[in-house]
Structures are given as structure tokens and as C-alpha cells.
Image: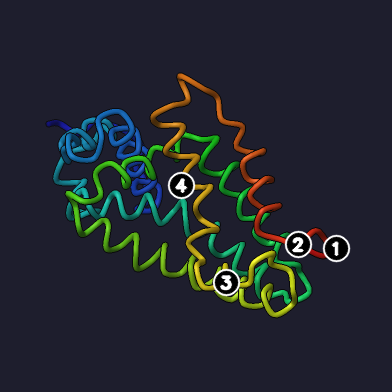
């Protein structure tokens, strides 16, 4: 295709435009059905220009996912490093960030696509596990171990299963994708209730 005439873009600006076009295509068509040609057309560039920035659509998708998840992990990780911050406060912040930055935005479609199409694209799934899931679990493990030692957890064994902390976030994506049209899920209530299930009330006992 002939590339549209437009003012010159610096590489980072061009990259951002490509990622925005890719996001729109993935959200509309799904990962499997989206072609690199579709992204190029959406971005208004030649396919060759697209390949200068991204070798394949897997790398495009990985860049999008990383851009969503990495800032959340960094912020929660920074909170965990502050040992005076109660574990419940740190987990509540993670839920608030997830709700604001993912669940209540179009970014939720990226996680929906990983859940739905990830098994067909091991490169994407492998990246998501290595760079997002393992890092997130490492942060949560430190947090829960400290909470267990400090008597903050209703059941200290929870520290051995950090995946539990992610469960409400994953559930909220599944519900929004499949069942929200039938029954509304109050995600804030879901997160707050789960926090009550995990942690001893502040200043209280089990």
C-alpha cells in the first residue's frame, strides 16, 4: 500500500502510533485474526515500515502487554519495599490500580485475549508468564510472607499460594467478558470482600 503523506515522525512517536493501531486491531478482531497488514493500514503506513519497528505481531502484542503491566508491577513493588506499609494496604492498592488502569479501560481486552488465545501462541504466553506473572508473584510472596510473620493473615498458609491474590482480578476479567451482560459484578465490592477474607481487621484478631 502507499504510505499516507504526513509530517515526519520521530521513531518513538511512530512506534506509539503503531502500538495504538495494533491495540485497536487486536481489540476488534482478536489476536489470531489480526494480520500485520491490518495494523499497517490502521496506522496509515506501509507494511515495510511496520516491520522496521516490529518483526511480527507477537512482538507487537508483547509490547502492548508490557506497557500495561510493567507500571503496575513497579508501583506495587515500590510499595512492598516500604516495610511499614501494611500488607492489606499494598494489596488494596494493587486492586485499585488494576481496576483503574485495566478493568475500567479498553486495556482489559489485552488480558481477555491472553486468556482466550494464549494457548495457541506460546511465544506470547511464555513472555507473559516470565515477565509479568513471575515478577508479580515474587512481589506478592514477599508481601504475604511478611504479613504471615506479622499476624496479618487470617490463614498464614495463604502465603504459600500467592496466586490467590490475583484470583479476583482474573475473575473480574472473565466476568466482564462472558457474563456482565447477564448480571453486573460490583468489582469494588469483590475486591473489598476478598481483602476481608485474606486479612485480619486492623488492630483486631481472627
Residue drawn 38% across and 52% down?
65
Q: Real-space Cα distance between discs 3 and 1? A: 19 Å
Looking at the rendered structure, which numbered label has been put on residue 170? 4
Query: Camera-side residue: 6 or 14?
Result: 14
Looking at the rendered structure, which numbered label has been put on residue 142? none
Circles 3 and 1, Cβ within 8 Å, touching? The answer is no
The residue at the far bottom in this view is 149
Which badge, 2 or 3, is on the more N-terminal residue? 3
Q: Real-space Cα distance between discs 4 and 1? A: 29 Å
Q: Real-space Cα distance between discs 1 and 2? A: 6 Å
- Image quarter where the N terminus lies is top left
Task: Indicate left or right for 158 with 52 as reference.
Answer: right
The residue at the far right in this view is 203
Task: Indicate left or right for 183 with 81 as reference.
Answer: left
Looking at the rendered structure, which numbered label has been put on residue 204? 1
Circles 1 and 2, Cβ within 8 Å, touching? The answer is yes
The residue at the far front in this view is 206
The residue identified by callout 3 is 157
Question: How packed is label 4: few (under 14 Cα within 10 Å), some, or many (20 or more)?
Answer: few
Question: How packed is label 3: few (under 14 Cα within 10 Å), some, or many (20 or more)?
Answer: few
- Image quarter where the C terminus lies is bottom right
Find residue 133 and report its image quarter. Answer: bottom left
Question: How packed is label 1: few (under 14 Cα within 10 Å), some, or many (20 or more)?
Answer: few
The residue identified by callout 2 is 200
- Residue 144: x %, y % from top left: 61, 71
- Classify mark 2: helix, strand or loop: loop
Which badge, 3 or 4, is on the more N-terminal residue? 3
Disc 2 or disc 4, which is closer to the eye?
2
Residue drawn 28% across and 50% down?
60
- Up/down of 64 relative to 77, above or below: above
Amino acid at each position: 500500500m502507499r504510505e499516507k503523506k504526513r509530517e515526519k515522525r520521530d521513531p518513538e512517536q511512530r512506534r506509539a502510533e503503531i502500538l495504538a493501531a495494533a491495540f485497536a486491531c487486536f481489540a476488534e478482531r482478536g489476536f489470531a485474526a489480526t494480520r500485520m497488514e491490518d495494523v499497517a493500514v490502521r496506522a496509515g503506513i506501509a507494511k515495510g515500515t511496520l516491520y522496521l519497528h516490529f518483526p511480527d505481531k507477537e512482538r507487537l502484542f508483547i509490547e502492548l502487554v508490557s506497557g500495561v503491566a510493567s507500571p503496575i508491577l513497579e508501583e506495587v513493588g515500590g510499595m512492598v519495599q516500604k516495610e511499614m506499609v501494611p500488607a492489606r494496604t499494598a494489596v488494596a492498592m494493587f486492586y485499585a490500580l488494576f481496576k483503574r488502569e485495566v478493568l475500567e479501560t479498553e486495556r482489559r481486552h489485552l488480558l481477555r485475549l491472553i486468556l482466550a488465545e494464549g494457548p495457541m501462541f506460546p511465544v506470547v504466553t511464555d513472555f507473559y508468564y516470565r515477565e509479568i506473572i513471575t515478577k508479580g508473584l515474587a512481589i506478592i510472596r514477599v508481601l504475604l510472607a511478611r504479613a504471615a510473620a506479622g499476624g496479618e493473615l487470617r490463614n498464614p498458609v495463604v502465603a504459600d499460594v500467592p496466586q490467590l491474590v490475583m484470583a479476583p482480578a482474573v475473575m473480574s476479567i472473565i466476568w466482564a467478558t462472558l457474563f456482565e451482560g447477564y448480571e453486573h459484578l460490583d468489582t469494588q465490592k469483590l475486591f473489598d470482600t476478598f481483602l476481608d477474607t485474606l486479612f485480619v481487621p486492623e488492630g483486631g484478631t481472627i
